[in-house]
């Protein structure tokens, strides 16, 4: 059948994924929560569509039965991934999403055995989060298989966050930074872990963040100590540290809902010319008691990369190039996957 399904297709990143599909000759079947938005977007591209919440089990499963692979774009995934994964297992549908939430990777991993029994692949993080960083982690581990410590970092040059990504960040307000220490998660105050990182073409101060790689890189490499950083500036670091005094307020559901409503008033993502003019830099360092090694990647803008990588992985599944069970990009396809994406290269 080789039908591709996309949930949340009319969102900012979903639209980019649909456009990438059409570019490579795939006509996806789309769905989402909003009847008005789904119909308008589907009519524009002459696509089949459906409308439902992921909590509507029967409608979700009936839709999934129409395809072989779903790319789930309806985040925040911490609220939607469980229903989608369970429906995929019920309908024998391969699962991809574009999350960067470490909690979601851990959640999906719990379904590993069920997916293997059904010969299905479950791969959260098929976009910028976490294809390039996961491949970078695997690349470093291949060069230093005795590594006990892994540090990863990324920074955007010239890009802006989409509305969906900003909403995910709002969901994590008030929480500590999560890193992995001796194989277990450890929480430390946001803004405590700061370092200057040489991204290759420039250096930039970077701050430790809770990112999907604390889960995926551990799965892909087995390295027990993992921390992720994101490029920032002194002003942002100061703001983060000030929010620590209000962390109890920022954890409030009422406050988060208010901030999300304010975010809904903004444009849903960077314009095409802004996106095309920007790019991402990634850095990684693996070390053990005897020394350390570094590597650097440059990729297109994160949203552009997400469209290309998620569709590329769906194409691989259609070609029966897959590994059953829970997988990360690098555990399924190795460190070279990122180099299959146009515009990605090591510095």
Image (cartoon, rainbow, N blue to C red):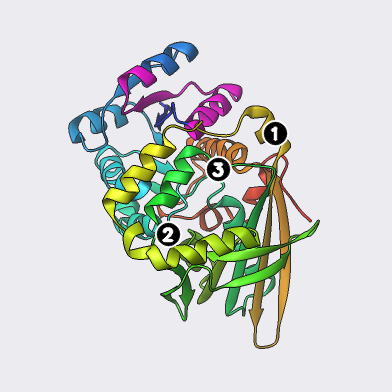
Q: Look at mark 3 in the image and give the residue it sits on.
A: 161
Quadrant (top left, top right, bottom left, bottom right) of the N terminus: top left
What residue lies at 37% left-to-right and 64% top-to-bottom? 247
Q: Look at mark 1 in the image and give the residue it sits on.
A: 276
Eyeballing the image, is 121 above or below 289? above
Local SS, label 1: helix
Local SS, label 3: loop
Q: Sequence-wise, which precedes: disc 1 or disc 3? A: 3
Q: Residues within 10 Å of mark 1 (few under 14, many from 20)?
A: some
Q: Sequence-wise, which precedes: disc 3 or disc 2? A: 2
Which is nearer the eye, 176 or 307?
A: 176
What's the CA distance linking mark 1 and mark 2? 28 Å
Asked whether 13 falls inside the magenta stretch, the response is yes
Q: From the viewer's perspective, is the residue at label 3 or at label 2 nearer?
A: 3
What residue lies at 22% left-to-right and 38% top-to-bottom? 55
Residue 283 visible in the current orientation: yes
Q: Position of residue 28 (x, y in %)?
A: 45, 24
Q: Position of residue 304 (x, y in %)?
A: 61, 37
Q: Sequence-wise, which precedes: disc 1 or disc 2? A: 2
Instruction: Answer whether labels 1 and 3 touch (C-beta < 8 Å).
Output: no
Asked whether 120 falls inside the magenta stretch, the response is no
Stretch in magenta: 12-37
Q: From the viewer's perspective, is the residue at label 1 or at label 3 nearer?
A: 3
What's the CA distance linking mark 3 and mark 2? 19 Å
What residue lies at 65% left-to-right and 73% top-to-bottom? 286
**Is residue 184 left or right of 33 when viewed as pictured?**
right
Q: Look at mark 2 in the image and give the residue it sits on.
A: 102
């Amino acid at each position: 059948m080789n039908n591709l399904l996309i949930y949340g297709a009319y969102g900012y990143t979903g639209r980019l994924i649909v456009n990438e599909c059409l570019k490579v000759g795939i006509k996806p079947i789309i769905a989402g929560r909003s009847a008005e938005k789904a119909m308008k977007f589907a009519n524009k591209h002459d696509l089949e569509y459906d409308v439902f919440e992921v909590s509507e089990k029967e409608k979700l499963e009936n839709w999934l039965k129409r395809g072989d692979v779903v790319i789930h774009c309806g985040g925040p995934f911490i609220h939607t991934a469980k229903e989608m994964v369970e429906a995929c297992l019920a309908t024998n549908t391969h699962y991809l999403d574009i999350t960067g939430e470490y909690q979601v990777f851990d959640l999906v991993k719990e379904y590993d055995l069920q997916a293997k029994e059904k010969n299905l692949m479950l791969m959260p993080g098929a976009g910028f989060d976490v294809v390039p960083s996961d491949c970078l982690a695997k690349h470093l581990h291949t060069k230093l298989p005795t590594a006990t410590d892994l540090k990863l970092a990324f920074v955007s040059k010239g890009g802006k966050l989409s509305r969906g990504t900003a909403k995910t960040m709002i969901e994590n307000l008030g929480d500590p930074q999560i890193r992995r220490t001796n194989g277990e998660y450890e929480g430390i105050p946001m803004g405590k872990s700061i370092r200057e990182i040489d991204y290759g073409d420039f250096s930039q101060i970077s701050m430790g963040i809770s990112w999907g790689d604390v889960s995926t890189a551990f799965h892909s490499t087995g390295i027990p100590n993992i921390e992720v950083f994101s490029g920032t500036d002194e002003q942002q670091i100061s703001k983060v540290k000030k929010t620590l005094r209000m962390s109890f307020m920022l954890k409030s559901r009422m406050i988060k809902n208010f901030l999300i409503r304010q975010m809904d008033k903004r444009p849903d993502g960077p314009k095409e010319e802004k996106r095309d003019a920007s790019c991402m830099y990634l850095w990684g360092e693996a070390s053990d008691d005897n020394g350390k090694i570094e590597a650097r990647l440059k990729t297109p803008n994160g949203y552009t990369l997400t469209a290309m990588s998620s569709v590329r992985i769906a194409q691989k599944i259609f070609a029966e190039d897959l590994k059953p069970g829970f997988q990360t990009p690098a555990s399924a396809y190795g460190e070279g996957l990122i180099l299959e994406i146009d515009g990605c290269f090591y510095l």
